[in-house]
Image: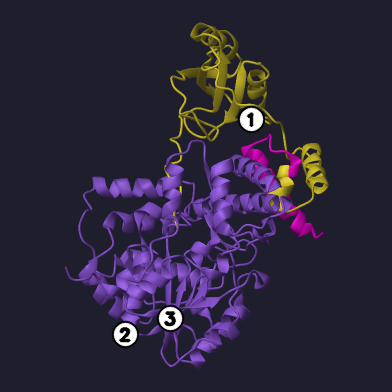
Amino acid sequence: MKPLSRAVGSVPASGIRRFFDLVAEMDDVISLGVGEPDFVTPWRVREAAIWSLEKGLTTYTSNYGLLALRTEIARKHAERYDQNYDPAREILVTVGVSEALDVAFRALLDPGDEVLIPEPCYVSYGPCVRFAGGVPVPVPTRAANRFRVDPDDVAARVTPRTKAMLLSFPCNPTGAVMGREGLQALVDLAVKHDLYVLSDEIYDRLSYDAPHVSVASLPGAAERTILMNGFSKAYAMTGWRIGYACAPAHVIEMMMKIHQYTMLCAPITAQLGALEALKRGDRDADEMVADYDRRRRVFVGGLNEIGLECPLPGGAFYAFPSVERTGLDGESFAERLLKEQRVLVVPGGVFGEGGVGHIRCCYATATEKLVEALRRMKEFVSSL
Amino acid sequence: MSREHDDDLRAKVLHILEKDARVTPDRIAAMVGASEDHVRALVEACERDGLIRSYRTRVDWEKAGEPRVFAFLDVAAQPERGRGYDRIAERIFRYPEVHSVYLVSGSQDLRVVVEGRTIQEVATFVAEKVATIEGVRGTTTHFLLKKYKDDGDLFVDDPADPRLAVSP
């Protein structure tokens, strides 16, 4: 038989699959391995979706998504970040940020085009670039720099083939955030080298110590930035698969072309749920964020007490401690911790080379469970 | 520390204790990023100044094998010059079987929650003690049949965590 696609074949299998199989055979595991909230979607959002189904709202929508939803998205960005997007032409509602990323890369890249991707990062960026025929170019970020992107590291990797730079702050898996100045330096680089900027800001609402700075709101950024966001994290809507992209009209037009032929539109029920979330879900989101903040301090404080060094992360709901002092790498630490103490964490190497000496722990879990997980981790660390 | 910072911290502490009065000062300190002594002092000040009125335990007496009867009582009353409904309310709220007394808008005036061991006991209390108070023009009694949610607490069990063990 003829070989399957080289682009797809070149992407290795996900590093977390193995842990699925291990954990499936165990009882009483505390999982800090998830990438989603432990809350269910706020009732008002679920109720709005149920009501829409009862009313029979079960059709396709505009390829761009419901205009009412795009209008609310535009309002949110104007109010929170002073960004102005035209709901008619500059916003595309997608099936999660995942789809937004996919269509953005496909709209931007020709074969061989390079995309700069700071690592450690979410696992999908590199593979999506490859599926689109592009070449992911990792840019290291370091614990010593709180996993922020250093413009010099970016500049050193720009080539004539570089087409775009990806940013994702607050960051999964590191919890890193970047302030105005640091982001502006990166935007300036993008302007200098004429790069597009893809900014995945799915964790924007989960910024604890300082207000989130949206990349597209910075001088020089709007005309070259594809901003992506969604509802999964802020409103605990992961399973709804609903997100969006905001960008200049000609970019959205290209993305919509792919979206219209592959997805047609995002599911209407999810769109209507998202509409309710934006209109009336602020209080629900604020309460969840306050809860994550409390757990963040309890959990990260506990990690440091047992010698797993971890500065307080400024965003998302992950702690990314170094396990180097235990003499183990993240992979063996995670595997032994699971087998010996039944606590599941994700080895940092899954998120890129720079994460090898770390583990990712999601603290979107009840405080009592976090405390018990810390107790078990302490036992494990002392046994080494 | 600034006054504003302290007020903000106090609000955070109160929000935590409102949901769970048993969270210990060291845990609260970890949650809000303050010292344990500071949290203790804040809580003591709140208790002293009446911002924290009490700490209690919500018991499911049904499960504890000691079921109780509750009734919601709508009371129509004659307001009095100079003191409104205060005298009548006080005559009612002094009884230990009375859980709460509210002055409400609408066709009735006072909403009273009464607790007893049997329906008969509650009915007798209403007829003998409440309806006979001077100025009470009438009462309507609604017996509680099933508790779904009480002061923010659900009385139904939530399903277990449905999330996959690992996700990116």
Q: Are marks 1 and 3 on the same chain?
A: no
Let me know if marks 2 and 1 both belong to one chain: no
- Give the amino acid at mark 1: Gly
Which mark is nearer the camera, 1 or 3? 3
Q: Which residue is disc 2 drawn over? A: A110
Please say whether residue B25 is one of the residues in the magenta stretch.
Answer: yes
In the drawing, what numbered circle is on residue B137?
none
The residues tagged by marks 3 and 2 sit, at their Cα atoms, a distance apart of: 11 Å
Which residues are drawn in magenta?
B1-26
Q: Amino acid at mark 3?
A: Val
The dominant secondary structure in magenta is helix
Q: Position of residue A295 (x, y in %)?
A: 62, 49
Out of A61 and A184, give the one closest to the viewer.
A184
Q: Chain of mark 3?
A: A
Determine the chain carrying the residue at label 2: A
Which residue occupies the foreground of this view, B104 or A187? A187
Mark 1 vs 3: CB contact within 8 A: no
Which chain shows up in purple? A
Residue ranking furthest to the left: A1
Q: Are marks 2 and 1 in contact (CB under 8 Å)?
A: no
For the residues beneath circles 3 and 2, the answer to whether they share a chain is: yes
Mark 3 or mark 2, earlier in chain: 2
Q: Chain of mark 1?
A: B
| Residue A94 place in picture, x, y as percent | 33, 66
Query: Compared to B101, does A148 lie above or below?
Result: below
Q: Which residue is mark 3?
A: A115
Helix, strand or loop at mark 3: strand
Q: Which residue is mark 1?
A: B84
Q: Secondary structure at mark 2?
A: loop
